[in-house]
Amino acid sequence: MLKVPVLKVFFLICIVLLIGACAQAPVFFQPSSPTGSPTLRPASTTNAGQKIEQRTWLVPEDYKNLADAVQVALPGDIVKVSPFSESTGQVTIDKPLTIIGNKMDYLPIMVRFLITSGKVTLKNLTLYEITLETKFNTDVPVTIEDCRIGDINVSSPNIRFVHNTFGGKLLVKPSGAVTLTTSRFPASQDGVETLKLEISGSGSIVEKNDFWAGIVQVMDNGSNNTLRNNYWAKWDATKPVPVKGSAKSVDRLPSSTPVTSGWPH
């Protein structure tokens, strides 16, 4: 029969083993799910060189709003947003994520995006009346792709716009720089054309886009910006295109055909 001191030692060993097992399986406590029940899931841990598992979160199926889903997602995860979800207020993205809307039924998101990480992608969204503020020091860009965009201000470098439609104005502030490609700037439906792209910073690249109202849509007041191979409506493509603004930029090789000819105009 075991003596009392021996039993105490046995129980102490069991407690130590139990604590060690718990330490090897960390969990994150997540905000409440749509049903109101909190959920737990294992944290992603990795050794050097080991790839972290990518997860996909659904809004509003998994989380009622975009902000909650972004909060619980881990670096490299995907957040898919469906129409009619609650997507207002501020969304802070502080890790590499991909946020995807519904390609066929664009999701209107009226939010303030605060992005403090590189390698963030916003895709298939209607970004209407948004503020995009980025605060990060990295060579990895933020990418906005296949979106419908209203007015948007850019005050940071390394922002990529790819294959978007701009219904409002893209303002690149003095501290900002963009790479803008294969996007379109439609003509106004009421015939009153306004400025759609204004660049005040330096180092932006504007290439292979369609300006459907022509040169009236663009102004460059910055420096060292590159405009090339864009389509300018109502302009003879055999001639260089003088861009309005103090920079006196020129698109020397304009495209004679629309880049986005397959899109509705």
Image (cartoon, rainbow, N blue to C red):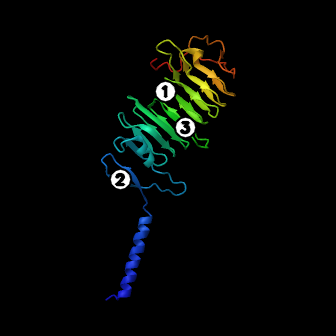
The N terminus - image quarter: bottom left
Residue 156 pos. (x, y %) = 60, 36
Q: What amino acid type is highlighted by mark number 3?
A: Glu
Instruction: Determine contact: label 3, label 2, CB under 8 Å.
Output: no
Q: What residue would you read off at disc 1?
A: 150
In this figure, which residue is indicated by the disc labeled 2?
39
> In this rendering, would 98 be left or right of 201?
left
Residue at position x 46%, y 40% in the image = 90
From mark 3 to mark 1, how far is it between C-alphas? 15 Å
| Image quarter of residue 102 | top left
Question: Residue at position x 34%, y 53% from top?
Answer: 38
Residue 132, numbered circle: none
Q: Is residue 145 depicted above or below 261 in this figure?
A: below
> What residue is shown at x 36% (from left), y 44% (from top)?
63
In 3D space, how far apart are the residues under numbered discs 1 and 2 (Cα atoms)? 36 Å
> For the residue carrying disc 2, how many other residues have a C-alpha within 10 Å: few (<14), some (14-19), or many (20+)?
few
Look at the image and tell me whether residue 154 can be seen: yes
Which of the two discs, 3 and 1, labels the residue nearer the N terminus? 3
- Disc 2 secondary structure class: strand
Residue at 61% over, 13% down: 237
Does 156 appear above or below 190?
below
Residue bearing the label numbered 3 = 133
- Closer mark to the observer between disc 1 and disc 2: 1
Q: Earlier in the sequence, mark 1 or mark 2?
A: 2
Query: Nearer the N terminus, badge 3 or badge 2?
Result: 2
Gap between marks 3 and 2 measured at Cα: 31 Å
Say which of 70 and 141 sits in front: 70
